Image: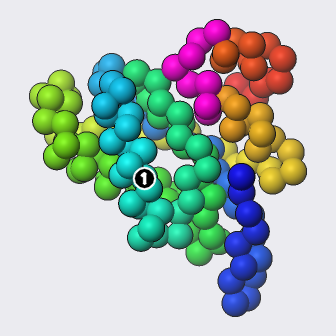
Amino acid sequence: MSEYVHKSHNVSVLLYHFVCPAKYRRVVISKEVDQSLKDICLEISKRYEIEFIEIGTDKDHVHFLIQSVPTMSPTKIIKAVKSITAKEIFKLHPEVKEQLWGGEFWTKGYYVNTVGRHGDENTIQAYVQAQGKLDEYEQIHSQQLKLF
């Protein structure tokens, strides 16, 4: 769950929902890659002011629910996440690099949306958790998610 971030001159709760497709929308996110991605993100949160609230993977894309601080723009956040995760996944899973010619793990683009602390956070969190689980997603989507 998100928390208020207290800095010397501000208090914030900034939540972002990012969606990052794998390059060429290739099916490269196995259970092993999923676990590595989550482990890498834990390390990222130790070095940067980025907190991963949820990470939901599907076979060809990843949803991140991220909390950060006002000094980090959404672009700066996702550039750090994408560059570090790509480099580490290629190191840990050379078979993925073989499937993605050109040496890039992620597409150049991404989707980002802000999430309200007292509004849509739980809905987005449930949606991100349901990634890769079609039946759960359809149930959530039909009842609550009218965002997309």
Q: In the depicted view, which residue is nearer to us: 66 or 26?
A: 66
Q: In the depicted view, which residue is nearer to us: 10 or 3?
A: 3
Q: Quadrant of residue 108?
A: top left
Q: Is residue 82 left or right of residue 131?
A: left
Instruction: For the C terminus, give its image quadrant.
Output: top right
Q: Quadrant of residue 8?
A: bottom right
Coordinates of residue 46 in the picture (x, y in percent) = 45, 67
Coordinates of residue 127 in the picture (x, y in percent) = 67, 29
Q: In the depicted view, which residue is nearer to us: 13 or 33?
A: 33
Q: Which residues are magenta?
A: 128-135
Q: Residue at x 32, y 55 (%)?
A: 84
> Does the magenta-highlighted stretch encompass residue 130?
yes
Q: In the depicted view, which residue is nearer to us: 33 or 85?
A: 33
Coordinates of residue 45 in the picture (x, y in percent) = 47, 62
Q: Residues within 10 Å of mark 1 (few under 14, many from 20)?
A: many
Which amino acid, by three-letter code, is at mark 1? Cys
Badge 1 marks a residue whose secondary structure is helix
Q: Is residue 143 above or below residue 13?
A: above
Q: Is residue 112 above or below residue 70?
A: above
Q: Quadrant of residue 123?
A: top right
